[in-house]
Image: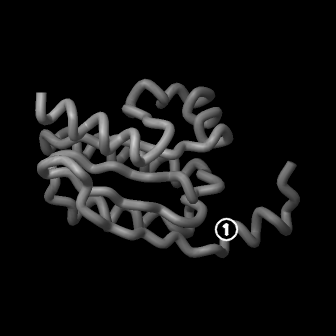
Amino acid sequence: MVSTLQFLAMSAEPLVIDRFHGGGHNQDVLCLKGPLTLYTHSSLQNAVRTEAASTVILDLAEVPYVDSSGLGALVSAHVSLHKSGKHLVLSGVNSRILKLFEITRVDSLFLIFPTLDEAIDTLSNSANA
C-alpha cells in the first residue's frame, strides 16, 4: 500500500524520456524513467507528437507508477499514432501497470512485450519477413 507521503513524493518525480532508434527500419524507442502522472504526462504527449517513425516503442521498464492521467496519455498516444497509420508498442510493463490496464480494459489496445530487447527483435524480424 502506498502512503500519502509516498504518493506525493512519486508525483513530484520528473518523467525523463530518452529517445533512440530501434533495431528495425523506421522504428524509434522512447525510454520512460519516472512515474507517468497528471504532473508528467504532457512530456509523453509532446514526445509522441514529434515522432516520425512508423513504429514507436515505449519502454516502461523504469516507470514505477501510472495514474489515470498517465493512462489517458498512453491511450491518447495510441489513438493519435493509429490515426496517422503508425503503431505504438509497449515494453517492460510491470505487474502493477499491467493490472491497471486489465482493470480498465485497455490491455487489448496495446501490443506488449516483456522486455525492450524482445520488442525490438520481434518487430525487426517481422519487418524483414
Going 30% across and 34% down the picture, which residue do you hit? 122
Give the percent coordinates (x, y) of residue 46.
Answer: 32, 67
The one nearer the camera, 67 or 94, is 94
Left or right: 30 in relation to 81: right
Q: Nearer the viewer, residue 102 or 56?
A: 56
Q: Is residue 104 above or below residue 3?
A: above
- In the picture, measured across the screen, residue 42 lies left or right of residue 26, that is right
Q: Residues within 10 Å of mark 1 (few under 14, many from 20)?
A: many
Q: Position of residue 4 (x, y in %)?
A: 85, 62
- Residue 63, picture quadrant: bottom right
Q: Is residue 52 left or right of residue 116?
A: left
**Pointer 1 residue:** 11
Residue 5: x %, y % from top left? 85, 68
Q: Is residue 49 left or right of residue 12?
A: left
Amino acid at the residue labelled 1: Ser
Given residues 34 and 124, the one toward you in this image is: 124
Q: Secondary structure at mark 1?
A: helix
Q: Residue at x 83, y 54 (%)?
A: 2
What residue sits 65% from the left and 38% below the top? 95
Q: Which of the image's four quarters has the C terminus? A: top left
Q: Residue at x 21, y 34 (%)?
A: 125
